[in-house]
Image: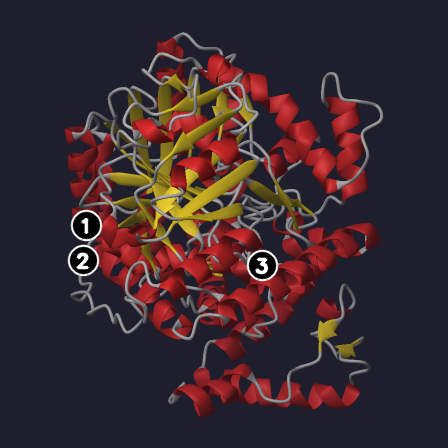
Amino acid sequence: MTHASARDEVLARIGHALSGTPAPVEVPRAYRRTGEHPPGAPELLRLLTDRLVDYRATVHAASPQTVEPVLAAVLGGLDRVVVPPGLPVGWRPAGAVVDDGTLSPAELDRVDAVLTACTAAAAGTGTIVLDGSPDQGRRAITLVPDRHVCVVHAAQVVQTVPELLARVDPRRPLTFISGPSATSDIELQRVEGVHGPRTLIVVLVADG
Amino acid sequence: MSEVFLGMPAHAPADVAALHAARPFPAAARDALADPQLRRNIGAATATIRGKRAHVVAELDDWEQLRLAGQAVKAATMSRLDEHLRRLEQEVTARGGTVHWARDAAEANRIVTGLVRATGADEVVKVKSMVTQEIGLNEALAEAGIAAWETDLAELIVQLGHDTPSHILVPAIHRNRAEIREIFLREMPGADPALTDDPRALAMAARAHLRRKFLTARVAVSGANFAVADTGTLLVVESEGNGRMCLTLPDTLITVMGIEKVVPTWADLEVFLQLLPRSSTGERMNPYTSAWTGVVPGDGPQEFHLVLLDNGRTAVLADEVGREALHCIRCSACLNVCPVYERTGGHAYGSVYPGPIGAVLTPLLTGTAGNPSLPYASTLCGACFDACPVRIDIPSLLVHLRSRTTQERALPSAEAVAMAAASWVMASPWRFGWAGRLARLGRLFARRGRIRRLPPPLSAWTTARDAPAPPPQTFRDWWRENRGQP
Ligand code: SF4
């Protein structure tokens, strides 16, 4: 058996190591799986805002009626804005570049901002998830530009991490974002803004 | 090799340099203790992170329930590790990835080198990963003429400083801002001579330095924090965005992962994604977590390889007590609370895994003969257990390893006398309890919470360091009162 594959060998080693091991214990799941507030509750929108601001993101409140003017104000003055192909047309600033999947990293590096929607958000940790859907785009467009503007709808906001994970499909390419990029590598002091977008702007849209 | 030996759990080979201390811990610790700058740097940094962790842990009223769940998920996973790995392989393969298996460091390095060569690239960008440090991948790639660029800020500081990591989470924790500035000025091509030692300015210098690399890299190498068996999903938890850059922009992604990183289901992550960030950086959630499954057409690397590594892990699994060390999620909380680590720093442990978890995991991976002094790099104060998000009972593992060490190897020197005595005490629950209560009398001799001298044979320990005064109540007494039977 000198030519046993590494795969067979490692699996056989595990088999030996585990022989005689009793059946696994039941996992106690007494932790909090759902929050006390339903998705989109005003308390959750306040909590999400607090958490995001705590991580140096900027939050703008909007309603379904005001989302377009709020976005226009946030993006005003920026020359080059990239948007994913499925973003609502009304949100697109004039002259926006619609990503067709061909922009190279170097080209994305010359863009001023990216505007996307999101998949879900957790208020308790201030986390937003993108999953590559048409209104969020491929991962590179929300990574290379230095400014990310992200629209979050109230109905997408849950309280806890378990509720958040239950809302996303693990087989899609996922990015969990909690504030702008940061490092604590120098004397464990947090510095916001390293390789990912240095500015994160969230437009939080309350229910109509 | 005869058939009889196929599949016997194996330790990490003796040539895995990152796991084999060149010098015994007591000698290396003595040198570290003589470096006041090092002690100041590490003391300041660990004090900062302890405060942050305590603050965000206190926010969750279900923290203990999360720890219990994390511990149980890991134990259940280990007991069926082969099944979960087969499932992971099946799911990754079904979604366009390629799975490779490596018995040890050398085999993993050969696989990765071959994969990089096949792309024609002569450089790779790297996401911080303990496992590639463990196998010495950068050195192996360099021998093959392939440059590996570390992109995590702390790893970059270590790499530019021709240094080795001293902490799991913040490998450059032993460097202060002034030292980092000097390294950047000396080693970073085109660094601005006017660079200050402000952490923000230093971080921006790193951004500028790496930007072009990210935008042009064709191959990336990463580790993984978790792999979900039933979906084939891999996760990297990070802060700076260097991970996202490496996982997203290159054409080819090679992920090297220890076999113990698998978890059975996506829902299990609801536990670990709460435990890990709060325990490691003291954040409610780290800035970025990336999750991907195989290859996604039109989004990210179009070629994905997963290398599953043993390198001693099956030997750890075969030790029914020691197995628990495989539950570690590498948060580094046990390092940050450890009185020994705080004084010696990480290099004294002589392993890529320092601190309390390193003192147990390293000799478990190599066999105790490979690192006989590491299980003694602890005062058994119990702070590591209290901090551990998956409740690894490190003090008990240390005691277990001390008895394994003396059984497996006759120790030379005066050190041996102390260790044999300690081991004799540790090997029996009642003797250990009795010794702990006796040591409590040491409080009477302590000045300002530190004992300067202990009688022989323990004086061998206190000539090199102040032993912390024993707490008024021993860990075991406290345990008995608070958690029932010891
Ligand atoms: S042993 Fe526990 S506390 Fe230490 S690094 Fe591992 S998970 Fe964290």
Q: Position of residue B449 (x, y in %)?
A: 76, 80
Q: CA distance from mark 3 to mark 2?
A: 33 Å
Image quadrant where residue B392 sits = bottom left
From this view, report whether residue B378 is shown above or below residue A111: below
* Residue A15 disc label: 1
Measured as percent of width and height from the top left, residue B334 is found at 54, 62
- Residue at numbered disc 3: B335
Which chain hosts label 2? A
Please state which of the two labelled residues, at mark 3 or mark 2, is closer to the viewer.
3
Pinpoint the chain carrying mark 1: A
Q: Which residue is mark 2?
A: A19
- The answer to whether mark 3 is within 8 Å of ligand 1 is yes
Question: Could you tell me if residue B356 is visible in this image?
Answer: no
Instruction: Give, as a three-letter code, the residue at label 2.
Output: Ser
B105 or B286: nearer the eye?
A: B286
Judged left or right of residue B162, residue B318 is left
Quarter of the figure that contains the C terminus of chain B: bottom left
Between the residue at mark 1 and the residue at mark 3, the CA separation in whole angstroms equals: 32 Å
Label 2 within 8 A of ligand 1 by Cβ:
no
Q: Are marks 2 and 1 in contact (CB under 8 Å)?
A: yes
